[in-house]
Amino acid sequence: MKCQRCTKPATLHITEVLPSEKFEELHFCEDCAKKHLYPASGNTPKPAGGKSSSDAASEDPGGKVCGACGIKFVEFRNSGRLGCPHDYDEFQEELVPLLESIHGELKHNGKTPLRAPAGKDGRVELTKLRRKLQDAIHRESYEEAARLRDSIRGLEEN
């Protein structure tokens, strides 16, 4: 599919919701999409602090690139899939408002497993006991390991 404004291939597909439950599909190349999304400046927003145009491209959300997997933010927006776990850190500024608008929260408040401890203190205690258990196993202190194992089971059952 070609861009609606020029002859380049369309890489960004936008569905705009119009009044009266109508939709408009727009198909743009990356350059025309920037002009459509940032009409006031005609291109990407001008960065504060007088940075060069190459710095401006890296500050454009669509131009940000993950150093680990090489995915651009605009590619994530098109596909809805991130490339690697590092993308959450790399695109944090753009993802936080997006997640808030989709989920209403940034913290998961869903169901928890029945065996999970009730409070946060219980989870912290479980984590400490599991670390001590691993340490006891490495030291070959099996009596202490058995005692820690029993303590962990007791916390998991409550």
Image (tube, rainbow, N blue to C red):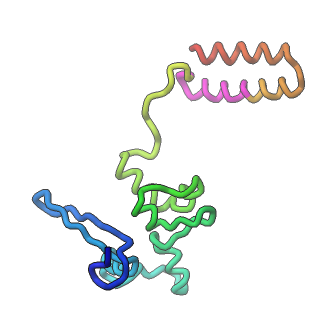
On-image quarter of the C terminus: top right
The location of residue 69, given as percent across then percent down, is: 60, 62
User: Residue drawn at (40%, 63%), measured in percent from left and top?
Assistant: 78
Q: Is residue 42 above or below residue 129?
A: below
User: Residue drawn at (13%, 61%), measured in percent from left and top?
Assistant: 19
- Residue 149, image quadrant: top right
The location of residue 110, given as percent across then percent down, is: 43, 33
Q: Is residue 67 above or below residue 86?
A: below
Q: Is residue 128 above or below residue 69?
A: above
- Residue 124, image quadrant: top right
User: Residue drawn at (77%, 24%), measured in percent from left and top?
Assistant: 133
Is 125 covered by the magenta stretch? yes
Q: Which residues are magenta?
A: 117-130
On-image quarter of the N terminus: bottom left
Is residue 20 rendered to the left or right of residue 150? left
The location of residue 103, given as percent across then percent down, is: 37, 46
